[in-house]
């Protein structure tokens, strides 16, 4: 049951990220979008995620983040 939920969430993430990830396999989505080498820093109660420079899947990750965390009203 949990495997089916995880599969469906990966497929939804691939579609929201757009590009070539809409029809990508789960392993590809995990490698390119979910397992990313980033640095997390905390300053003055704000959490900052430092993404790698010249990361080839930056636009797909931005699309997924924007779709799941819309800007505040």
Image (cartoon, rainbow, N blue to C red):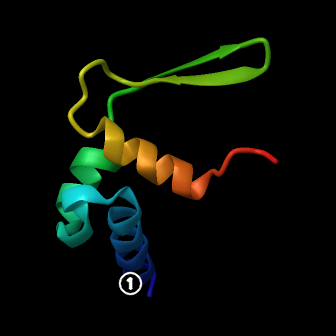
Count the labels in the image: 1
In the shown orientation, is residue 63 left or right of residue 68? left
Where 70 falls versus 57 (above or below)?
A: below
Where 62 falls versus 30 (above or below)?
A: above
- The residue at the point 24 percent across, 46 percent down is 32
- Please, which residue is most extreme toward the top here? 43
Where 58 falls versus 42 (above or below)?
A: below
The quarter in which the N terminus is drawn is bottom left
Characterize the local packing of mark 1: few (<14), some (14-19) or many (20 or more) Cα atoms within 10 angstroms.
few
Residue carrying label 1: 4
| Residue 30 pos. (x, y %) | 28, 54
Mark yes or no: residue 35 visible.
no
To which quarter of the image does residue 54 belong? top left
| Residue 26 pos. (x, y %) | 23, 66
- The residue at the point 17 percent across, 68 percent down is 25
Mark yes or no: residue 72 visible.
yes
To which quarter of the image does residue 47 belong? top right
Indicate the secondary structure of the residue bearing disc 1.
Answer: helix
- The residue at the point 41 percent across, 63 percent down is 16
| Residue 66 pos. (x, y %) | 54, 49
- Please, which residue is most extreme toward the front here? 73
In the shown orientation, is residue 70 left or right of residue 39? right
| Residue 68 pos. (x, y %) | 57, 57
In the shown orientation, is residue 28 left or right of residue 44? left
- Please, which residue is most extreme toward the bottom here? 1
- The residue at the point 33 percent across, 47 percent down is 60
Where 47 falls versus 67 (above or below)?
A: above
């Amino acid at each position: 049951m949990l495997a089916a939920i995880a599969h469906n969430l990966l497929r939804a993430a691939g579609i929201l990220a757009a590009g070539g990830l809409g029809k990508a396999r789960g392993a590809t989505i995990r490698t390119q979008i979910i397992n990313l080498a980033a640095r997390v820093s905390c300053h003055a109660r704000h959490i900052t995620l430092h993404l790698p420079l010249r990361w080839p899947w930056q636009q797909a990750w931005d699309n997924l983040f924007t779709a799941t965390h819309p800007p505040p009203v």
